[in-house]
Amino acid sequence: MNRVEIESFIKSFLLFFISITVLVGAVFYLQYKESVKSMDDEIFNRMKVCSFSLNCDDLNLEFIPKDDKVQLYTLYKNDDTLSSYFGITDSDKYLLKFTLGKSHYQERLEKLKNGFLLKFFLLILIIALLSVLFSFYALHPLRKALVLTEELIKDILHDFNTPLSALRLNTSMLKKELQQNSKIERIEQSVQTILNLQSNLKAYLTNTTLQKESFSLKEVVQERVLFIQKLYPKIEFETDIEDKMLTCNKDAFIRILDNLLTNAAKYNKKNGSVFLTCKENVLEIEDTGIGIENPDKVFQRFYKEHDRGIGIGLHIVKKLCDELGIRIALTSEVGTGTSFFLKLDNC
């Protein structure tokens, strides 16, 4: 199961398991209280019978002076004993008092409680099993939808190849005929943008082991800034990157940079700026853009705050960062801008 399926399974399991467990627990609690009351009534009835026969092995019998404060034929429960008082025929001075010691009562209460707990935990195991089955059943439509979505994306990616190949081939032929010019350059940039989107979609679908290689952070940043700047000529990019070597998957790191730089330019203000700095192994990408209203949600799959995009760019960034061992964080203020921080200690 992938991450979405695991999350859905856990939520379905917990929802079903906790709700049924709470309901069953409430029923067992009410039954336990009713059983304790029934046990008290049974003890009181035995006391009542003993008031006639005076033959009760586990009950203590006493004759006490009559007390008007004592209510007859009532079971009294205190910390030490259970007791009840009964009148004596033809006697106005004395009462019968029956008591059951706390140890005897606690023993019976503990036995009753253990019986209920055993039944309750056995039922909890059954509920857990049913919750698992329910969760798998509830997960089936989601899994089917995800499979259909992935198959659709794969088909679209496959269909991209033919027109993209034709575009790249014809662009190369035009460059030979017309030489390099701004129009051809914009076509090449647009094709490259589509290829980047294609790479993002492939990263969304696949979970492959990434091969590590060494490369210069400064060179890669300058290369990607130059490429993104051509797509957004009205955005000013400034870099202050220390020259250091990274050891991780270069293609994955480039996809992270491209996504973050593209977002920083796309959602920037008119004639805005993007600043890239790297100090103490932390690469910061700061923009003067519109900001993010819900920074804690931006890495969720398909979450987006604007009509543009499909909401998987930053999700893929987070996924690639996790695979490369890069810790990513952000701060944002609506109307002021956003800063992303990439901690590169593990690269």
Image (cartoon, grey):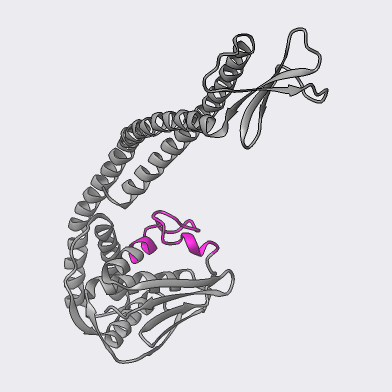
Residue 278 visible (yes or no) = yes
Q: Position of residue 137 (x, y in %)?
A: 32, 33
Residue toward you, 190 or 306? 306
Residue sitting farthest toward the bottom: 243
In magenta, the rendered stretch is 293-317
Q: In this view, does 345 lie above or below 311?
A: below
| Residue 168 falls left or right of residue 68 | left
Q: Where is residue 157 in the image (x, y as percent from the top left)?
A: 23, 54
Q: Is residue 144 above or below residue 179?
A: above
Q: Is residue 7 above or below residue 38?
A: below
| Residue 262 falls left or right of residue 253 | right
User: What residue is rendered at 62% in x and 28% in y?
Assistant: 82
> Of helix, strand and loop, which mostly describes the magenta segment?
loop
Q: Position of residue 296 (x, y in %)?
A: 49, 62
Image quadrant where residue 230 sits: bottom left
User: What residue is rendered at 38% in x and 30% in y?
Assistant: 123
| Residue 140 falls left or right of residue 98 | left
Q: How many labels does the image show?
A: 0
User: What residue is rendered at 27% in x and 71% in y?
Assistant: 324
Image quadrant where residue 161 sits: bottom left
Residue toward you, 149 or 141? 141
Q: Is residue 4 above or below residue 37?
A: below
Q: Where is residue 42 in the image (x, y as percent from the top left)?
A: 56, 17
Residue 313 highlighted magenta (yes or no): yes
Residue 150 highlighted magenta (yes or no): no
Residue toward you, 92 or 171? 92
Q: In which quarter of the image is the C terminus?
A: bottom left
Image quadrant where residue 265 sits: bottom left
